[in-house]
Amino acid sequence: MLDNSTFDYKPHLKSAYIDPIRTVTVIDDEYPTIDDLISSTKDSFSQDNISRLKDIIDISRSEEYNWLLDVYNGKEKKIQEGTVSNRLYHSDLLILDYHLDGEDSGYCKKSIDIIKNLSENRHFNIVAVHTKGYDGQKGSVNEVLIDIITSLQERPAISI
């Protein structure tokens, strides 16, 4: 019998979570959507953001992964209302910008609501949240993680 301290979990994690991924959805208000790219608004996006999105596209299309990719800007009506578009439920991996409205200085309710909605779906597996933390300060990424974890916890029933 294998001892837990010597067992290598990494190949099993990859086969359980990474290998089954076929579709990826990115939600980021600073990335151009496909609609933006074919319209005249594409010039309003910074080259740094377009370059980061291109990196995601390149990884998704690589032979190693071969993932189908879609990009949303977080401006969909359902997302504005704190619910999730049905299309997101069909994605195997969601890459979510924590600061969907460009707001860097505090709790980001829109992103938290998306994560909460997806956590209630038995078929949804992975959300990768990218953030620079609150106010871009070193160490504040941990605060974002704590906000996400605490938002997913049920409130205790208190009887008085």
Image (tube, grey):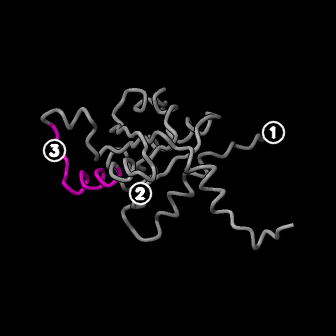
| Discs 1/2, front | 2
Residue beneath the point at 53% across and 42% down: 115
Q: Answer with left or right where residue 61 lies relative to residue 89.
A: left
Q: Earlier in the sequence, mark 1 or mark 2?
A: 2
Q: Earlier in the sequence, mark 3 or mark 1?
A: 3
Determine crowd level at label 3: few under 14, some 14-19, many 20+ residues with C-alpha closer than 10 A: few
Determine crowd level at label 1: few under 14, some 14-19, many 20+ residues with C-alpha closer than 10 A: few
| Marker disc for residue 44 | 3
Q: Image quadrant of residue 87?
A: top left
**Which residue is identified by label 2?**
131
Residue beneath the point at 55% across and 46% down: 126
**Which residue is identified by label 1?**
159
Q: Secondary structure at mark 1?
A: loop
Determine crowd level at label 2: few under 14, some 14-19, many 20+ residues with C-alpha closer than 10 A: some
Magenta residues (range): 41-56
Q: Secondary structure at mark 2?
A: loop
How far separated are the C-alphas under marks 3 and 1?
53 Å
Q: Is residue 143 in sight in this rendering?
A: yes
Q: At which x and y percent is residue 148?
A: 55, 51
Q: Secondary structure at mark 3?
A: helix
Q: Amino acid at mark 2?
A: Thr
Q: Image quadrant of residue 133?
A: bottom left
